[in-house]
Amino acid sequence: MAQTSGEKDDFGMLLGWRADPAGEKIALLMQSSSKVVESDDDVREYRYFLTKQQAVQLGNFLYGVAGETPPPPRKPGLLERLLGG
């Protein structure tokens, strides 16, 4: 969706986020502000639903932009290996 030049607050600083499971998707809440926060009215909230694949791609992309590498996959523990998990 294209934004018009008259829209207020076309950009801002990320203040925080929260991600929660939502069935087969992930519910992502992001908070931002375009100025120093003096009241709750200065904080904008955006809600997104992502597939798990989109969440992984976004995470890997952000690691790359930051010049970092994602952590290696966790190896299964002894109990998981014994039970075939």
Image: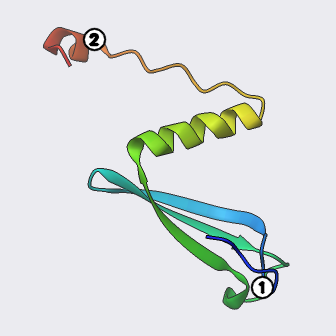
Q: Is mark 1 on a helix, strand or loop?
A: loop
Taking 56 as reference, is 62 left or right? right
Task: Count the marks.
Answer: 2
Image location of residue 26, percent across then percent down: 40, 54
What residue lies at 69% left-to-right and 90% top-to-bottom?
41
Give the alpha-carbon distance from disc 1 to disc 2, as whole Å: 55 Å
Is 45 placed above or below 49 here? below
Q: Say whether disc 1 or disc 2 marks the residue closer to the N-terminus.
A: 1
Position in image of residue 51 (x %, y %): 39, 48
Say which residue label 1 marks.
Answer: 8
Side (left or right) of 31 relative to 21: right
Badge 1, how many Cα within 10 Å: few under 14, some, many 20+?
Answer: few
Query: Can you say whether 85 is above or below 55 in the image?
Result: above
Task: Give how far across and how far down residue 62 sits, in percent.
Answer: 67, 40
Identify the residue at the far right of this view. Answer: 36
Q: Is 29 placed above or below 7 here?
A: above
The residue type indicated by label 1 comes to: Lys
Residue 30 at x, y percent in the picture: 59, 65
Q: Nearer the viewer, mark 1 or mark 2?
A: 1
Quadrant the N terminus occupies: bottom right
Considering the image in quadrants, where does the C terminus appear? top left
Give the side of residue 42 with respect to residue 56, left or right: right
Residue plotted at (49% across, 45% down): 55
Kind of residue at badge 2: Leu
Mark 2 sits on what residue? 78
Residue at point 43%, 20% (across, down): 74
Could you tell me which residue is drawn at 14 percent across and 14 percent down?
83
Looking at the rendered structure, the secondary structure element under dot 2 is helix
Q: In the picture, residue 15 is in which quadrant? A: bottom right
Q: How crowded is mark 2: few (under 14 residues within 10 Å), some or many (20 or more)?
A: few
* Quarter of the figure with residue 23: bottom left
